[in-house]
Image (tube, rainbow, N blue to C red):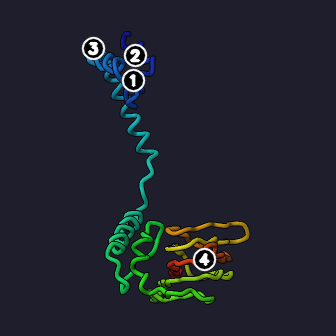
Amino acid sequence: MNEQEYIESGMVLDYSLGLLTGPEKLAFEHALKLYSELDQELKAVQEGLEKYASAYSNLPLPSTKGKVMNALENLLHEKQMNLNKLPVINKFSDPGAWMAAVAPLLPKVVDGEPFMHILTATDSITQLLVMSATDIPDEVHEDVWESFIILEGECECHIGTDTVIRLTAGGYLEIPMHEHHNVKIISKYVVGIMQRIAA
C-alpha cells in the first residue's frame, strides 16, 4: 500500500487506538518510516483523540477527594475498632469487625422487646446496637439520614409503598429521608447497627 491507501483505509485510527496487532502493526510501523505524510496524519489523529478525550473526560468534583479520604480513614478505624470512638457505618463497613466489637454487649437471650444499646450519641450522630426478634414498626424521618448494617440474621426493609429490600449479614441500607419504612424480621432475630446523622 502507498501512503494514501494507508490513510484512506482507516489504519491510522486503528493504530492510534491500539487495534492493530501482529504483521499488520509491523507493516504499518514500517510504512510510517517510509512515508512522512502518513506520519503527519498519525500525529494529527492522535492529537485529535487527545482533544476529544480532554473535552469529554469527567473530572471528579473537588469534594470527591475528601469523601475518598474519609472512607479510607473510616476503614482504618474499623481495623482498630474502639467502642469509645466508633467510625461511621457505610457501604464499605466490615460487618465482622463491628460484630467482634459489639458482641460482648449483646444479651444472651432475645425476649419480646428489641434490645437497644447506645454506642454513639452526639449532636450530629447517633449509633445504636439493635437486636430484635420482633418487627420494627413504620416510621419516617424528617431531619436525620438513617442507615443500618446487618451483623447477624435476615430481614426485609419496606420503604414507601412498593420497595422491599431483603438484607442478610453484611447488608447495608440507607433510608431516604421523608420516606415511611419498617423492618420485618425473617430469621429468629436480627443484630445490626442503626445510625442516624443529622441533616
| Near-viewer residue (130 or 39) | 130
The answer to whether mark 1 and mark 4 are in CB contact below 8 A is no
Q: Is residue 63 visible?
A: yes
- Front label number (1 vs 4): 4
Residue farthest to the front? 109
Residue shown at the point (44%, 87%) measured from the top left: 105
Image quadrant in which the N terminus is located: top left
Q: Which residue is mark 4?
A: 188
Mark 3 or mark 4, which is nearer the start of the sequence?
3
Q: Which residue is mark 3?
A: 34
| Near-viewer residue (183 or 53) | 183
Q: Which residue is mark 2?
A: 6
- Front label number (4 vs 2): 4
Residue 77 numbered tag: none
| Mark 4 Cα shell of 10 Å, populated few (<14), some (14-19), many (≥20) | few
| Mark 2 Cα shell of 10 Å, populated few (<14), some (14-19), many (≥20) | some
Mark 4: which secondary structure?
loop
In the drawing, does residue 184 fall left or right of residue 145? right
Residue shown at the point (48%, 67%) measured from the top left: 91
Mark 2 or mark 4, which is nearer the start of the sequence?
2
Please name the amino acid that badge 1 sits on. Answer: Val
Mark 1 or mark 3, which is nearer the start of the sequence?
1
Please name the amino acid that badge 4 sits on. Answer: Lys
Mark 2: which secondary structure?
helix
The answer to whether mark 2 and mark 1 are in CB contact below 8 A is yes
Q: Where in the figure is residue 82, as x and y percent of width and height? A: 34, 82
Q: Which residue is mark 1?
A: 12
Q: Where in the figure is residue 95, as x and y percent of width and height? A: 45, 71
| Near-viewer residue (50 or 92) | 92
Please name the amino acid that badge 3 sits on. Answer: Leu
